[in-house]
Image (cartoon, grey):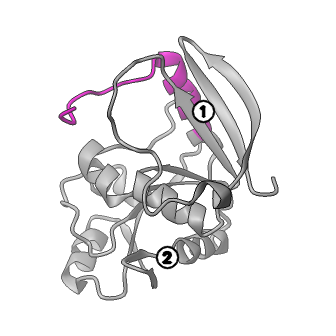
Amino acid sequence: MHGRSKWITGSDARRRGHAMRAEADAIVVGANTARTDDPRLTARVGANVVQPLRVVCDTSLRLPLTLKLFRAPLASGTVVACGPKASASRVRALEARGVRVWRLPLAGRHVSPRAIARRLASEGRHEVLLEGGATLGGAWLRAGLVDRIALFVAPRLLGDGLSWLGGKGWALEKAPQGRIVSIERAGADALLLVAVGGN
């Protein structure tokens, strides 16, 4: 586990993931995911797809400006959500590349998930896909903003690995109860869709 492996799931699961992106109004990732994976966060399912807004949560604006998301042609469809005390010079540097910057309030040490959700809703973006990482997913789940979880499961026996849900957990008797909506094959992998809360 050195961060060099590229794929765990197969091509069918990846195509299904791109279809989910195409259905979303926005994709949100955390700073660690952006730094480690340097993703494009585009829906690669056809020529006429309307691309979702790409949102990166970077509280202190410490991500390198060399990321793909901050370069043309992706920069113009990318937003960075930062805290109120983030560097003004970093804001200017991002905006000079065509990236929009949202200064938002914090919840603890990170940008408030509720503030991001409100800002997205104000722009008419209601179908939001969280792609990682664990800190982001945990924060949005604890804020009550997650209504379903899509888990791709690959039959690879890796042992220790990265968690998909971070932060302080719950005692078993207080853990949120999900409901399995569907289980489907995606090539050699499986997609488990879980409804959260009252959904």
Q: Nearer the viewer, residue 162 or 74?
A: 162
The 10 Å Cα crowd at callout 2, few under 14, some 14 to 19, many 20 or more, is many
Residue depicted at 62% across the width and 27% down the height: 191
Q: Which residues are magenta?
A: 1-20
Instruction: Give the mark nearer the N terminus: 1 vs 2.
Output: 1
Q: Amino acid at mark 1?
A: Ala
Vertical position of residue 165 compared to residue 170: above or below: above
Q: Secondary structure at mark 2?
A: loop
Q: Secondary structure at mark 1?
A: helix
Residue 49 in view (yes/no): no
Residue 186, magenta (yes or no): no
- Quadrant location of residue 198? bottom right
Q: Position of residue 84 (x, y in %)?
A: 36, 87
Q: Nearer the viewer, residue 76 or 69?
A: 69
Is residue 63 shown left or right of residue 14?
left
Residue 193 in view (yes/no): yes
Q: Position of residue 164 (x, y in %)?
A: 45, 45
Tell me the tag on residue 141: none
Q: Nearer the viewer, residue 95 or 178?
A: 178
- The residue singled out by tag 2 in the image is 112
Q: Quadrant of the N terminus?
A: top left
Residue depicted at 23% across the width and 83% down the height: 87
Q: Amino acid at mark 2?
A: Ser
Residue depicted at 30% across the width and 55% down the height: 32
Vertical position of residue 25 compared to residue 125: above or below: above
Residue at the extreme bottom of the image, as rendered: 85
In front: label 1 or label 2:
2
- Quadrant location of residue 197? bottom right
Tell me the tag on residue 19: 1
Q: Position of residue 58 (x, y in %)?
A: 33, 68
Q: CA distance from mark 1 to mark 2?
A: 28 Å
Q: Position of residue 122 (x, y in %)?
A: 65, 75
